[in-house]
Image: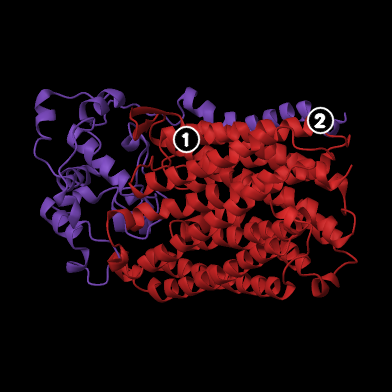
Amino acid sequence: MDVDKKPVTFIILATLVILVGTLLTTFIPLFVGTASPSIEKVMPYKPIEVEGRDIYIREGCNNCHTQTVRPLLFETARYGNYSKLEESAIDRPHLWGSKRTGPDLARVGTKYPAAWHYQHMKNPQSMYTQSNMPSYAWLADNKLDTQYAEKKMKVLGYPYTAEDMKKLEGKTEMDVLVSYLLRLGKELKQ
Amino acid sequence: MTENTYDYHAVKGFALSSLFWGIVGLLIGILISLQLVYPQLNFNSWLTYGRLRPLHTNALIYGFTVPAAFSLFFYLVQRLGRTSLAFPGLARVTLYVFNIAIVLAALSLFAGMNSSKEYSELEWPLDIGVVILWVMFSINIIATIMKRKEEQMYVSLWYILATVVGVAIVYIGNNLAVPVSWFKSYSIYAGANDANVQWWFGHNAVAFVFTTIPLAIFYYILPKTTGAPLYSHRLSIVGFWALVFAYLWTGAHHLIYTPLPDWIQTVAIAFSIFLIAPSWASVINGYGTMKDQWGQMRSNYLVKFIVLGITFYGMQTIQGPSQAIRAFSALVHYTDWVPGHVHMGTMGWVTMTLSAGFYYMIPRIYNTEVYSVKLANLHFWLVLVGQLIYSATMWITGIRQGAMWQAMDKDGSLVYANFIQTLTPNYPFWNMRTAGGVIFFAGFLVFVFNIYKTIKSAPAVQRA
């Protein structure tokens, strides 16, 4: 078969070859549910947490912080219980990350109170002199844009009440980011 | 057929675009490297590390490497097919649309519009733009290959076609999202599935941007430059098909010890190790072609770029699979070892090979000689030394930090319980890395200057 003399045949063959691993390891797991756990136990995100998560994404926090604790002794000793499939089951997108310039944040919501986060986000060096984290003081000056808040909840399919939406009023970007950070590690219903 | 029937307008335009965005991407790289040690350099929201790091990677993938491929591929399909470009007008439009898209992409990332997915952070309107550009490019490539006058397609054309197909599949697959507004969307995948799709994309961006693109160029310019025939045609066939088959299985090696089901991780590890074979098929083909030509390492500056490029590819494709093994991953994953690994590939293999492609092609399409072999040699040594400093310091500090994270006392408590204790020892290494990056950047500027002067030295009619 002179496949190198027939470009169309070549393209079709190359596509099929590329699709084998693609389907078997990436797309079939989507449909057979291998990586899709039950979401019954997962606490849906509140609007304020969704907004905070979007600030986390906008500022690229995932470039320096992971959100997945590995099932290794030294890792659980540092960060707490290892991450489970269910905990990120409703996360769109996932924020597991790939680099730890700073520490993992999967359990950070169980470690510090809100005041700690406000101070740390405003001036990380005031708490760790040698920290290389940028200051995010300016987030406290930015009033939250709530224009798409309700649409986001609909697109993501999380339940919400009018009362939940009301909690966004008068919030700054810093407020919602801290609300999101305080949720990390508390994804599952008790 | 005379030289004049080839159409080089878009070839030239994409070459210049590539060099321009290359400078931008490298400058941002130097800034974010400095920010890691000097956080006060995060001047304002547009210039924070979190926004600039995606800009750095996107500028060098989509702003530098992709247009370099558009340029060199538009050249290669014409030469290897002994025919002119199928749609020269479309190629010009592609060039203008491309540069507009890159400007918008840069602005959107500065403004924090990103999907958080590594190496495909652009929001959905720009994703659609990327896909349209890719279709425009692909139509020209495929149509030109269809009307070729040379019956057999040479290896380089296989890798070009694999790039065309592969990028389209993984880019679209990973970026499927539901829009909320013009500037915001949510992935259609959730949790572990989203991660799995993301790294299927992530690792195959490596396959179809950082592997098949330079390989297409490598297989063309090595025999052309040395004058020696390719060592083994059969090896190139086996290597090609095994490579495009195996790469797609390996993405989950980025997710070892995450909640992703173990079997997907294990399959990815197995295929990662298998991937050494087709990768080294090209390395062996390169060294085999050099069999009686090693003297040219002294006499021909281009051969140095090509041979060092393929050597770094060889090292990269041993190091990568090693990192996929669980025990090694446990030590180096999430540390600076990984950027050290990536940059040996991008600064060593990819940039060396693309530079060699430009040094080979630019004088030919402008009907002139390279401006200065001395400067080309200076460029070679600067990027080589810069890259080695970069990679080596990152490997050292990556292993160091990984070991500090793991260190436990006999009573089971962490030796370095406070994360900051494991962070600050990075700083001297990161400063060294910045120095390596600056040396590399200096080499790149020498390269751009050399290409600029080469174009300037062309007969007036060729310069248009």
In the picture, measured across the screen, residue B173 lies left or right of residue A163, that is: right
Q: Which chain did the image draw in red? A: B
Residue that numbered label 2 is attached to: B147
In the picture, measured across the screen, residue A69 lies left or right of residue A173, that is: right
The disc labelled 1 sits on which kind of residue? Asp
| Mark number displayed over residue B127 | 1
User: Where, by quadrant of the figure, is residue B84 drawn?
Assistant: top right
Q: Is residue B411 visible?
A: no
The disc labelled 2 sits on which kind of residue? Lys
* Of B155 and A117, the residue lying toward us: B155
Q: Estimate the x, y position of residue B393 in percent, counting from the top left.
A: 50, 72
User: Where, by quadrant of the figure, is residue B188 drawn?
Assistant: top left
Q: Are marks 2 and 1 on the same chain?
A: yes
> Residue at image x 76%, y 70%?
B301
Q: Estimate the x, y position of residue B151 in percent, counting from the top left.
A: 89, 34
Q: Which chain did the image draw in purple? A: A
Q: Estimate the x, y position of residue B277 in percent, counting from the top left.
A: 73, 50
> Residue at image x 55%, y 71%?
B442
* Classed neighbour count for the residue bearing mark 1: other residues with Cα under 10 Å, few (<14), some (14–19), many (≥20): some
Chain letter behind tag 2: B
